[in-house]
Amino acid sequence: MTEYPDGFALPRGYVMFAHNNPSIDYGTLALCNALLIKKNLKEHAVALITDSGTIGWLEQQYTDEIIRLAFDRIIIDEPKDSEAGSRRYHDTRYSNFVDSYKNTNRPNVFDISPFEETIMIDSDYLMLDNTMDMVWGNMEDFMCNRKTADLDHKINNFGFGNRFNDMSIPLYWATAVYFRKTEKSKLIFQMMNFVKENYAYYQYLYQFSHSGYFRNDYALSIALHLLNNLMEYGSVKSLPIEQILFSLEEDEMHAFKDGSCVITTESKQGDFHLHTVSRNVHMMNKRAILRHSTEIITHAIS
Amino acid sequence: MDERLQKALDFSKYRIALFNRKEDLKIKVNNMLIHAHNGGIFKASQELISFVKLLIDAGKTTVVLIDVNGNPIQILDTQVFFDDILSKYFEATNYYHVEYTKIRSARSVNSIYEFVND
């Protein structure tokens, strides 16, 4: 466990990881989301876990005042180059690109988090409402979601009813994870790290297709399955809002207005549906968020 | 395009938009009914409200209730808990009523989105 100086650790807060690649400014995503947390939630301490390159870029882009407003703690944890993978990103259904993915140090969050109670969220899981305030002080040591839905209310976007394949284990999402620093949580994250170190073996054992990069969701799901004595249910409960709302990479954000995202989905080419979203939403088209980062920041600090 | 087909397609878009907004609204209202208390998570349902009222009427001040995760949660003051869940219930259902009325009166895709945030 990382030993922080006196006064550094805090009782409750959010942790986000941000490691920029040449195409995606994860630092700005985290900054936008941190400011939304400050705006919308009562408990709003935020720790950013990042690398020196990302924080350097963030300091060039934003004033010290904005960065201090967004983040209560900034922790440098350089990801290992050897662990980085590459993945294809989509920016609507008309554009895609391949770039590196360095977000592999999440299983270390138990050691790194400066909070006694932590909610670890993706930097693109935009906190637009106050429902996360209900999580704190829960009896459960560890919570994460299994259910998802997209903006068009489809609940099986990733196939197999949110399983690795039609005969495999349930898929849990690492998009939002609550944990308290207890033995149970520690074991889960240690197991995630073990899965990460033996990823090829577990890929073969659990029969999932390798995406070309380390998937935190997969490592979490396998860790939970192993720690649940290879049984399917019972070990981990859902967060109070049990369904994660997804906006897929094919979607486009047109505006950020009055704390809501105006998004069009396009599940089939030309078949557009407009949505105004004011609930927490996992906006998987990261560049769409970045195109509206100024509006988000302006709203959040107003 | 044939005028009849165009009208049918427009109506179809309207129906989908209407469905999406209604579903969004249901989820939002459902989320508004969630209540956290003493480490437990409850849904401010009509059933829970009635049961807690029954406990109060029976003179029970401190009770244990089972939350949505199946955990036993001690309620130290049933009256405070009752007031909280009743307040949540009214807040959510009033919101539902107001927004639902707006959606029902909308007669085009544009007007559906003009009024409602999910």
Image: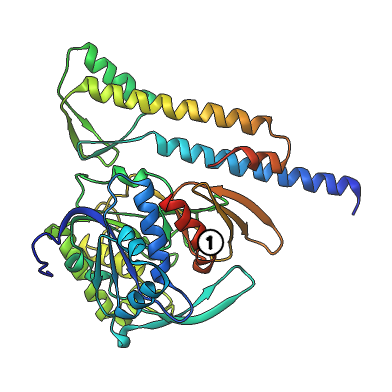
| Residue A186 image-quadrant placement | bottom left
Query: Relative to A72, is B40 above or below?
Result: above
Q: Chain of mark 1?
A: A
Could you tell whether B44 is left or right of A149 in the image? left
Q: Nearer the viewer, residue A195 or B30?
A: B30
Q: Is residue A103 visible?
A: no
Disc 1 marks a residue whose amino acid type is His
Residue A209 x %, y %: 43, 76
Q: Quick one: label 1, few (<14), some, or many (20+) residues within 10 Å?
A: some
Q: Is residue B8 left or right of residue A58?
A: right
Rendered residue at 41%/52% (across/down): A301
Seen from the viewer's position, the closer of residues A92 and A217 is A92
Q: Quadrant of the N terminus of chain A?
A: bottom left
Q: Is residue A298 left or right of residue B35?
A: right
Q: Return the x and y of residue A159 as percentages of the image width and height.
A: 50, 63
Residue B31 visible: yes
Residue A263 picture quarter: bottom right
Q: In the image, residue A24 lies at what x, y percent?
A: 46, 75
Q: Residue at x 23, y 19 (%)?
A: B79
Q: Secondary structure at mark 1?
A: loop
Name the one closer to the observer, A142 or A252. A252
Residue behind mark 1: A292
Vertical position of residue B92 compared to residue B50: above or below: below
Which residue: 13% across, 57% down?
A182
